[in-house]
Amino acid sequence: MNAEKTPETAAEQPKKKVDFPLLDAIKTPADLRALPLEDLPYLAEEIRQEIIHVVSNTGGHLGASLGVVELTIALHYVFNTPEDRLIWDVGHQCYAHKLLTGRKDRFAGLRQAGGLSGFTKRSESEYDPFGAGHSSTSISAAVGMAAARDMLYRKNNVISVIGDGSMSAGMAFEALNNAGSKNSRLVVVLNDNDMSIARPVGALSHHLSHLISSKPYMTLRQVALDMASRLPQFVKETALKAERHAKGFVTGGTLFEEMGFYYVGPIDGHSFDQLIPILTNIRDAKEDYPILVHVVTHKGKGYEPAEKWPSKYHGVTGFDIETGEFQPKKCTRPTFTQVFSDTIVTLAKKDKKIAAITAAMPAGTGLDAFAEKFPDRFFDVGIAEQHAVTFAAGLACEGIRPFVALYSSFLQRAYDQVLHDVALQKLPVRFAIDRAGFVGEDGATHHGAFDLAMLCPIPNMIVMAPSDQAELQRMLATMAQIDDAPSAVRYPRGAGVLPDMPDCYDPLEIGRGRIVREGNRAAILSLGTRLDACLNAADMLALEGVSATVADARFAKPFDTELLRELVEGHQALAVVEEGVQGGFGASVMTWLANNGLLEKTKVRFLTMPDAFIEQAGMERQYELAGLNARAIADAVAAMVK
């Protein structure tokens, strides 16, 4: 750190135009640390403009990244990264971090095929010590890194940056509880961008935060604690409670102090005059105990539309910078999320026992409309998927018909609850699994690749996958009537093939598929929205003289064994297509065929996602890489029959 610099010289906002680009000269954080403090506000402005410009073209997580620009600069300015480990929770707010760590030249390719990931990624940079994509993991990882540092007798700092939303998850509190019991240096920066924890930030709290982070105060407090430990127990407890109450009264840190953390804050996360000296004090402290720094930031800072509508600009597609308006949708067909939203509202109007639960994703799952119509039957439990599932199980025990709407990749976090708390007790909890299959630019952390492999082996579970939006509507109506078993429907991101929605809510017969096209030489059995690609593959095969039957399984569990037997016995070859990893629907089909002596009757090929993590790219490119586009399906069938 540059000891000769005076923190008080840092301006809160740029007061003059900078005649040269600061960001272009920063190749590593070492270049950043060479800047005088008074230049940091100008750098912050350049970084904001770069983020806005790139994300307006590529899409991405805008609001969160704009909100932590000053905090990111301050952390790299004070701490010696990458030797000091800086861990970003979720990682969706790491755009400024990427710009400061040697990735500016590649930043225009953010979230694009072959470009930068939209999250932190170990293989991308040494400045990303831990990859992320799901929330609430950073403190656990930081505790592990701090323990490893101590085992190896190193002296580096370990810093976790976690948002107040992520802090609501159980995993974060498990990590806090573990860290608070250890005498080990660890810094947790709580990025509070919703004012959900903080009292208003003002001059008094700034002064106190600066004071309590200083070495004299920290040393004096440790002396006092050591003295208290020698006093009778009741005197010690009284003294500690008084100290925590007095400090918590003005800072709100009582909870974290009780968990064993030294609390500093709240401080203004957009003020270098506050951030730099306080982080410097914390960096230079010699005491070995965990510290929590409570920083208040404003989501979308510096871009008026994102500040005004933080939820809308959390994750964005392309937009016009001047107006803030999003680019017109290229596809006007109904999305699966919209169909789920409309259907669940329609069903709930007829059935007052229907309730809806989500984990901090009301807009993303389409449940915001349900929340507006039926606020007493809507439950957003925060980033707590495990709790969401068992909470729904409790509702089901009392005769409520709960629908739990989660992204596929987030359902993974509640697998034990699905198995133990729902399926084992045969409770009729209904799972609406959004973002199943490939998700495009969000990449490997968010692909819905594993839900079929997770759910199909679970006893009592009914699993469906629609081929189009109308099928989703009927499947939701089917689930609303299932009162003796858990059920799930998985559907993808984006629009389906139908241009308009029919008004049909007729329930399906459980476990029955359908023939969509008749052929006589080969058969293709599709589960889910790859049906359209399978039909296109059949067209390609017809041009090659191969007549193909195409069937829609509809149900992954229980699946239609009569239909499967018909396809095997009446065709030379069978291709089973699913947008999930090996071990899901296809594995169940293979087992049934083997157990019933049908594998000898025809050639069978299973087309699934590969045994690999597919990186960010357009979805059509991902289908091509996975061998799940029409051409690949046709080639696989042709190879079997020829």
Image (spheres, rainbow, N blue to C red):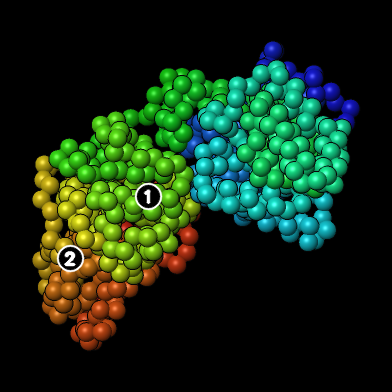
Q: Which residue is mark 1?
A: 391
Q: Horizontal placement of 505 versus 265: left or right?
A: left
Of the residues shown, which amino acid type is indicated by label 2? Gly
The image's mark for residue 14 is: none
**Location of residue 177 with respect to 16 vertically, above or below:** below
Tag 2's secondary structure?
loop
Q: Which residue is mark 2?
A: 511
Question: Real-space Cα distance between discs 1 and 2?
Answer: 28 Å
**Location of residue 604 with respect to 519 vertically, above or below:** below
Residue 9, position as x, y percentages in the image: 80, 18
Residue 499, position as x, y percentages in the image: 18, 41
Q: Horizontal placement of 240 versus 138: left or right?
A: right
Tag 1's secondary structure?
helix
Of the residues shown, which amino acid type is indicated by label 1? Phe
Q: Mark 1: give few (<14), some (14-19) or many (20+) Cα within 10 Å.
A: some
Say which residue appears at 60% left-offset and 21% top-offset: 200
Residue furthest to the right in view is: 4
